[in-house]
Image (cartoon, rainbow, N blue to C red):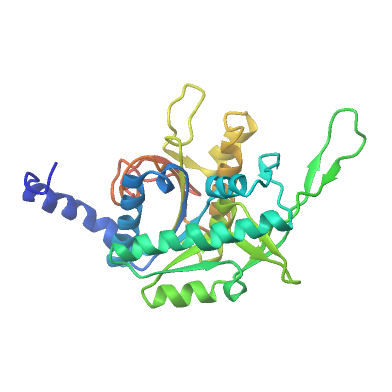
Amino acid sequence: MTEQTRDPRLVVEVLSEALPYIQRFSGKTVVVKYGGNAMTEDTLIDSFARDMVLMKEVGINPVVVHGGGPQIGELLEKLSIESRFVNGMRVTDAETMDVVEMVLGGLVNKGIVNLINQCGGKAIGLTGKDGAQIRARQLKVEHQSPEMTAPEIIDIGHVGEVEHISTDLIEMLAARDFIPVIAPIGVDAKGRSYNINADLVAGKVAEALDAEKLMLLTNVAGLMNAEGEVLTGLTTGQVDALIADGTIHGGMLPKIRCALDAVKGGVRSAHIIDGRVPHATLLEIFTNAGVGTLITDIPQDPNAG
């Protein structure tokens, strides 16, 4: 539908229906993990930036945490640096870490900041090293085969996990109407840099900020049951059961654990949403329909949003 053919009455109706959600979430913090198709397709990139600006304009405080794995891989290939993975995680030596910081803290981060600013927002890019926001420690990876009597500890270099999140800088920026855009790079007590999974960082940031929502953009429609149907509303207890019976497995498991931990840590709800859908974040916040799976600590009121 073009600008010339859009029915003004439809626009007014949509705004009116969104009003209760705007009133409910005004002043609340929403942490959004940005990645996947939403970061690589032009129409989705534009809709994401507009979503963040609109959320800020109606009084919601969005905080963006982004990934960038494909972009890191592309630059490593151009530099003839081999990429190796252990349990799905990139082995990150000092040389690779330099590339990670260039891509995540520079190219990707500033690209997102620029897009949001071009849409009328006020975004500021950060890494976890700015203001020592993300205190990290090295991630220990264990491997054990049936013939081994004890697990082997594999050193995958500068890959970290979150030890502590400091929110002072994020809260100061949000209070001054800026949209923080955070690259998932942490630093340890000795000043060493670590590449950290963006989902994990987003979840821990949401916990530290006592956020209303954690939204994880994915390349799938949401969490699905054995019949391939999207599970739209789940309690933490139901998610635990789905993990135990094997319904949740493979690549979706770490993302679901991240969302589950965030809700158990005090975030009111976590959403696994389909980032391939234009304006996915607005659909999830301002409509009953949604575009993914919602996880909360209590049974969800279908009219709660």
Q: Is residue 230 above or below residue 102?
A: above
The x and y percentages for residue 47 are 31, 51
Give the residue at x 90% y 39%.
Answer: 150
Query: Can see residue 62?
Result: no
* Count of marks placed on residues: 0
Q: Is residue 233 above or below residue 135?
A: above
Front residue of 74 and 269: 74
**Quarter occupied by residue 134:** bottom right
Front residue of 219 and 20: 219
The x and y percentages for residue 5 are 7, 44
Q: Is residue 86 above or below residue 51?
A: above
The x and y percentages for residue 211 are 47, 62
In the picture, measured across the screen, residue 79 lies left or right of residue 126, that is: right
Front residue of 65 and 91: 91
Q: Is residue 19 above or below residue 270?
A: below
Front residue of 130 and 146: 130
Give the residue at x 56% y 37%.
Answer: 252
**Quarter occupied by residue 74:** top right
Give the residue at x 12% y 44%.
Answer: 2
The x and y percentages for residue 138 are 75, 57
In the picture, measured across the screen, residue 224 lies left or right of residue 69, that is: left
Query: Can see residue 226?
Result: yes
| The residue positioned farthest toward the right in the image shown | 149
| Quadrant of image for the N terminus | top left
In the picture, measured across the screen, residue 32 lies left or right of residue 243, that is: left
